[in-house]
Amino acid sequence: MSPTNAIDWKQLAAGLRLDGRAFIGGERVAAATGAVFDCISPIDGRKIAEVARGDAADIDRAVAVARAAFDDQRWAGQAPAQRKATLLRFAALIKQHAQELSVLESLDMGKPARAALEVDITATFKTISWTAEAVDKLYDEVAPTPSHTLALVTREPIGVVGAIVPWNYPMLMAAWKIAPALAVGNSVVLKPSEKSPLTALRLAELALEAGVPAGVFNVVPGFGHEAGAALALHMGVDTIGFTGSTRTGKLITQMAGQSNLKRAWTELGGKSPFVLFADADIDAAVKAVTGSIFWNQGESCNAPSRLLVERSIADRVIEQCAAIAPRYAPADPLLDGTVMGALVDDIQLRTVLGYIDAGKAEGAACVAGGEQVRAETGGYYVAPTVFAGVHNRMKIAREEIFGPVLSIIPFDSADEAIRIANDTPYGLAASVWTKDLAKAHLTARALRAGVIHVNSYDEDDIVAPFGGYKQSGNGRDRSLHAFDKYTELKTTWIRLS
Ligand code: NAD
């Protein structure tokens, strides 16, 4: 990075106005009870804001406002080209406020501000602008019926969309839901994670400034078992878009069923395999797997947390991974050039350290990291960690750690690699590395996951769907497929003769 574009993030952070109030009906409001909770920065463990502790009463209010906005068609009734123009202004405002949003994200959940700027904000901008651009280019269908009749197959907005999102990419996960939901004309009530509510609230202000009518996009911060459950159970919510853990995804699905049978779209956890054959470009593979597992402090749903290596090259790969890991050593997220920041909170810190202890106790060899670092800052940092000699039955190979921990598992044949790769309850992403074209295709075909990478990892773009098989969820975010989640399909039969 050239010094000319270096950014003084600390100065930006010092000048920020942090507002944790909810956003309902186009206004900042306190929770109905007046309750708040502390927003703690993982960078140093210090309180940075008080956030409205929304509960069922606030969700009721937001859903009522969203319903009224949908029913009077102030947004749904606009031409797609008009909604597109508004959402493009929204995207432009995000770009205009990119540094502010980046530092907010960093303070709130611990990722390097530079990473937030280059990845999260850029992808949020692209998600909203691409989706806006798409929405006035969608055509409906006429079914191939006999000539005496006409059947129109049309897509309509569903009504009130509930969105519940996690803390690892707070703004981007919100954008993956709100962009398609708003573009087709729905009203939205968004519940951000209690661990990272600040950018979602700011997004709602920017949407209003761009011209999204008041009441169309509402944000109620709060805890999962309070505001989140109230949203998932609400009889006035027509569909729910959820991203988070598999455990919570199961609860959301139950709540949808026990209330109004709203459709529940789930985007859940992962334990993604990275299959490395001996004939691959090993240096490139090691760079890709370490770059991906240590990106975002390992807090990525699709992180390649299991590196399956052909036994003949295992020692070399282990040595290279262990040598590279320290380059990702955590540092101050508000310094330009920091590549790894803080874990989101003390709970996540203890969870990750617990898994590291479990790996050691089960006999895996910790060849890099394996400990908390920077404890003197008051923040929550873990050294990039590599385990060798891992067996797929071990806890560190079976459960999603959601931290900077790589488990290396040897294999002897392609069949064994595929069996180990698929031996997981998850199916979000996978990768295969080989120079043999047929082997690449056959392995990619056999891997049970929603996103497969060949000789790459983390190719990522709004143009292609993202989502999982098995217990990694049932929905697809991004691309034109995302519109399916937020529209109803209507058939209209017209008798012609
Ligand atoms: P989480 O399940 O704990 O929380 C996610 C959201 O659900 C939060 O807003 C939380 O407040 C809410 N919630 C929690 N309990 C709830 C309840 N009982 N009722 C209603 N809402 C409730 O997940 P997390 O720790 O915030 O996020 C990490 C998880 O998200 C990981 O498993 C990760 O893999 C997954 N994730 C998946 C994707 C994807 O696209 N598949 C993307 C990002 C993260």
Image: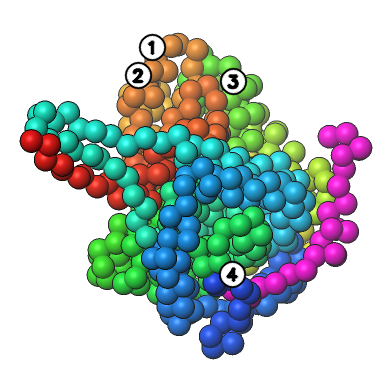
Crowd tier of the residue under label 3, counting other residues whose Cα lies within 10 Å: few below 14, some 14–19, many 20 or above: some
Crowd tier of the residue under label 1, counting other residues whose Cα lies within 10 Å: few below 14, some 14–19, many 20 or above: few
87 up-or-down from 43: above or below: above
Instruction: Report which quarter residue 483 is drawn in.
Output: top left
Is residue 110 or residue 113 the one in the foreground?
Answer: 113
Crowd tier of the residue under label 4, counting other residues whose Cα lies within 10 Å: few below 14, some 14–19, many 20 or above: many
Mark pair 2, 4: CA separation = 52 Å
Mark pair 2, 1: CA separation = 6 Å
Q: Which residue is mark 2?
A: 442
For the point 39% across and 28% down, the residue is 417
Q: Which residue is mark 4?
A: 26
Type of amino acid under label 1: Ala
Q: Which residue is mark 1?
A: 438
Residue at disc 3, CB closer than 8 Å to ligand 1: no
Camera sees residue 170: yes
Residue at disc 1, CB closer than 8 Å to ligand 1: no
The spot of residue 154 in percent (x, y) is 29, 43
Mark pair 2, 3: CA separation = 20 Å
Residue 6 is covered by the magenta coloring: yes
For the point 64% across and 21% down, the residue is 283
Quadrant occupied by the C terminus: top left
Residue 43 is covered by the magenta coloring: no
Q: Which residue is mark 3?
A: 282
Closest to the camera, between mark 2 and mark 4, is 4
Type of amino acid under label 4: Gly
Q: Check disc 4 and report its element: helix, strand or loop.
A: loop
Type of amino acid under label 3: Ile
Q: Which residues are magenta?
A: 1-22
Closest to the camera, between mark 3 and mark 1, is 1
